[in-house]
Amino acid sequence: MKYIFYTLGILILTLGISLTIQSNLGTSPFDALLVGLSTKVGLTVGSWEVIMAFIMIFCNSLLKRQRPQFLGLITAFITGIGIDIWLFLLDHLIKPEQWVSKLICLGVGLIVVGMGTAIYLYTNFAPIPIDDLMLIIQDLTKMNILFSRTFIYLFFLIMAIIFDGPIGIGTILTVCLGGPILNCFMPFVEKILNNYIMKNSNTLTSNYIDKKGTDL
């Protein structure tokens, strides 16, 4: 069950990322950096997701003073593929041209990113290195997710500007709203999924007891 939620969370997350990119109003600092690297250097946005993840895995290991957690590359690889697939599909389905449609695309993308991130983080399985970094900073500073997320966004904003990534009003909204949206989804997702898992667990237990009773 955990792996189903994990995969679902990644698929939702990458859809949200792709929607923000497709809005052409600017995306999150990290994704803007990926797009900038893709435009300036080459390769796809998803490919740079994996490359940057590899770099951050070593940075995270230094901060935690532990061996590199290469399991995070699995999530980064799936995320990279998801982004490239969604961008390919959305390029043929959604091309917002008016400001209103662009804002709607961006807003939906931000909400979907928050929901997808909360779902896959709930599974606590191979977090994307940037989200692992977020949790590390939260632990080191003893602050909440809102603070650590905003701190990371500001760092990658500078990097995105250097590589001429798509910075715009969408980037500002992501920096300001990304943390609060995730902070709102975390307890909501945890409550819903906990209830779902508990309900299924009780159902399986009840069926097992009924079956044993029938056998007797």
Image (cartoon, rainbow, N blue to C red):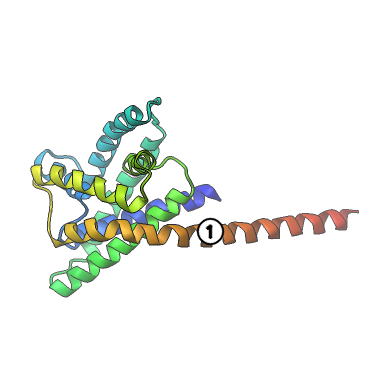
SS of the residue at dot 1?
A: helix
Q: Which residue does the image show at 37% across and 58% down from the upper left?
A: 183
Q: Which residue does the image show at 12% across and 48% down from the upper left?
A: 165
Q: Is residue 141 visible?
A: yes
Q: Is residue 54 above or below residue 100?
A: above
Q: Dividing the picture into quarters, in which one does residue 136 lie?
A: top left
Q: Is residue 124 above or below residue 104?
A: above
Q: Dividing the picture into quarters, in which one does residue 13 lie?
A: bottom left
Q: Position of residue 144 (x, y in %)?
A: 37, 50
Q: Is residue 69 above or below residue 77?
A: above
Q: Residues within 10 Å of mark 1 (few under 14, many from 20)?
A: some
Q: Which residue does the image show at 38% across and 56% down from the upper left?
A: 116
Front-lying residue, 98 or 162:
162
Front-lying residue, 176 or 9:
176
Name the residue carrying label 1: 193
The outermost residue toward the front is: 142
How many marks overall? Answer: 1
Q: Amino acid at mark 1?
A: Leu
